[in-house]
Image: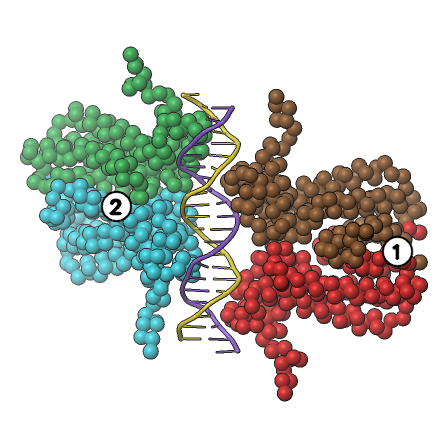
Chain colours: A cyan, B green, C red, D brown, E yellow, F purple
Amino acid sequence: MGANTDTQESGKRKLILEGALRVFSQKGFHNATVEEVAEAAGVGKGTVYLYFTSKTDLFVSVVEEKLKELKEALTEHIENIEGACAKLAGAIKLHWEFFNRSREFVQVILSDLSGMEKELDERTREARTAFVAVLESVIKEGISGGEFKEIEPRMAAYAIEGAISFVAFANLMNELDEPSAFDVSELADLCLSGLCC
Amino acid sequence: MGANTDTQESGKRKLILEGALRVFSQKGFHNATVEEVAEAAGVGKGTVYLYFTSKTDLFVSVVEEKLKELKEALTEHIENIEGACAKLAGAIKLHWEFFNRSREFVQVILSDLSGMEKELDERTREARTAFVAVLESVIKEGISGGEFKEIEPRMAAYAIEGAISFVAFANLMNELDEPSAFDVSELADLCLSGLCC
Amino acid sequence: MGANTDTQESGKRKLILEGALRVFSQKGFHNATVEEVAEAAGVGKGTVYLYFTSKTDLFVSVVEEKLKELKEALTEHIENIEGACAKLAGAIKLHWEFFNRSREFVQVILSDLSGMEKELDERTREARTAFVAVLESVIKEGISGGEFKEIEPRMAAYAIEGAISFVAFANLMNELDEPSAFDVSELADLCLSGLCC
Amino acid sequence: MGANTDTQESGKRKLILEGALRVFSQKGFHNATVEEVAEAAGVGKGTVYLYFTSKTDLFVSVVEEKLKELKEALTEHIENIEGACAKLAGAIKLHWEFFNRSREFVQVILSDLSGMEKELDERTREARTAFVAVLESVIKEGISGGEFKEIEPRMAAYAIEGAISFVAFANLMNELDEPSAFDVSELADLCLSGLCC
DNA sequence: CATGAATGAGATTTCATTCAT
DNA sequence: CATGAATGAAATCTCATTCAT
């Protein structure tokens, strides 16, 4: 009796998304073949096209899915924190952990987005925008609450997002001095109070 | 002897690099064809292979070249500035201007690097590392000079690099509120003294 | 016993043949998909394979069916006409009307038959031959009755069949001057007494 | 040296057209693969795409080419004949010979035209129309000269074209009684003076 | 040195057919 | 009997790379 019939995600669709995440992160969008994805998902090549209209659609779907997941986790996480500073620090921490837990995904979003059909590219942009908006709202809150200085909140959100992404990427690439020992609170502190003493 | 070997760049090679920058930035690495690059450079398709061993090699060379250029400009620029804070602010400013002056390049480095042959991938990583090292050294200097707090300098360098890159990219994509009016000193201030009041 | 085996056409089989005629005539054999046919017939895709061994078999069956239908109508029609001339004129008229009534069918028989498996190709050829044989017999009758000149009857039958088909096709394609006003008796007259005065 | 450089038809293009005629006539449009055509032409698969934009374009080009050839031969041939009857008989004879000389072509034009892109389909239609127009003009001439009866000339042209095509095809398929002994003047006579005594 | 015609490996996508339900 | 989800063979077309001129 189909307890999982309704639970969304036809099962196979999920399998394919997971396989795609794995393959895309290892070989990048353009160097991965649909056949490899199918194989990784344990389905036939044609099956992929039953659930996604094209290779590009599949890729975009992976990005959307994960970004939405992160966004929701983030939103929920900071809801229960008091104070903008603490919220932002919490957000950075969660973000960092997410990136480090799903290293694969970091690779995927760095994959070639240029030359993607406009409409599909739009979909990833929307997902990204929606995601950065979470940070932005925390910053706005901090400004109006008097905790943060009067700064362009959208810009600050992108700056922080960029800081986290690059540090996470460098960490994945083992370009940081002491990767394992790295303490994310240092990064949060940098964002909150800057470099100067 | 060899007056034009090292210094003058066989002319044609330069032409090709310029054409490649133009084409790659418009269409991305994978969607650009060697023929298009050759045409943009005003040379024959076969000629490209006299100066570069492959399409990938050409792409990597473009990245290297530009990154090296930026690194040198940066190094020279901060040499004449006193004080780590001022140096960093200057570096951020120059960096920002460079990114906005050569929008093309920002697009290029976002092109698909994943799945690139190891050896070539290594080359871009080195160029990146060398580049971030400039920021790192400024930060180190600031720490030992007592201007900056005791922070992991490599991490901080990546964070700042990421902040600049993302804000520049968002600006290019018109995702910032007032793109034209944007004042880069705000970003420098964020890096130096953080969000908090 | 078996009241519905031979005579009544399992119902579903008929539905499929009708759907196939519709779809094949609109998109041609190769551009039609079995799924489209199934949908047009209101049955499941798999069901098609319960009644026909393959897509090609289905197509050939449609042609056979229709050709047999036309042949029988023709045979019956001319049975009641006296005189070879009148018979032929009648045959041409009926033929023409049939083609114009079921435009769809004209399109179908123009669909790609080449490259079809020998055995199946054979089946359509037989259907065609059987069909042309009706005209042939009328001509033979006319010759032995002294109404027609001594001509190779098979050849004449093909010639007339070709004349009708091409004119009907041109008519469908709107390549005739006054398609609607076209009088088929002109065509019959051409066959019977030729171009010359 | 270079006597044939200018002589039109880059040589390779011609080779491909010839290979295509051969392959298409044996397997039909849809069942032939571009690779087979390339092989038959003795060139690489990619080379085909240097001269033709698509498989369909190649097919249409073959039809156009041949139809134009036949049309020109026909036009030239009847120019030197006096009298509409003689002209038409001559045209039928030439037509017949052409069809029997290039059996392959008859097969090709019977190949699947349905489902071909509109624009390309238009090209074959134009070629066909231009071709039938030759017969039409002879008939018009005969009518105004008093040799032929007042008949719709376009319709008559299609009828005759159809008669020739079907008889030629039947002959190729060995469906005529005495294929080798077949005398085309019988067909011409049928067209000119009909079946009746 | 420079060129661009020629090549063929390889990738995406379609769809006839099967088979478990 | 009926179905349609799943499959994978096969076909078109692209484009990096070579090499004869």
Q: Name the residue under label 1.
A: D194
- Label 1 crowd bin: few (<14), some (14–19), many (20+), radius 10 Å: many
The residue lying at 90 percent from left, 61 percent from top is C148
Name the quadrant containing residue B101: top left
- In the rendered image, the quadrant that contains the C terminus of chain B is top left
C174 relative to A33 in the view: left or right: right
Name the quadrant containing residue C39: bottom right
Q: Position of residue A168 (x, y in %)?
A: 20, 47
Co-location on one chain, circles 1 and 2:
no
Q: Mark 2 points at which residue?
A: A158
C132 relative to A91 in the view: left or right: right
* Label pair 1/2, CB-CB below 8 angstroms: no
- In the rendered image, the quadrant that contains the N terminus of chain B is top left
**Camera-side residue of D169 and B191:** D169
Name the quadrant containing residue A17: bottom left
The residue lying at 30 percent from left, 54 percent from top is A21
The residue lying at 68 percent from left, 47 percent from top is D104
Q: Give the SS element for disc 1.
A: loop
A196 relative to D48 in the view: left or right: left
D184 relative to A38 in the view: left or right: right
Residue D74 at least partly seen: yes
Residue B170 at least partly seen: no
**Camera-side residue of D190 and B105:** D190
Amino acid carrying label 1: it is Gly
Q: Position of residue F17 (x, y in %)?
A: 40, 34
Pinpoint the chain carrying mark 2: A
Direction top: furthest residue: B1
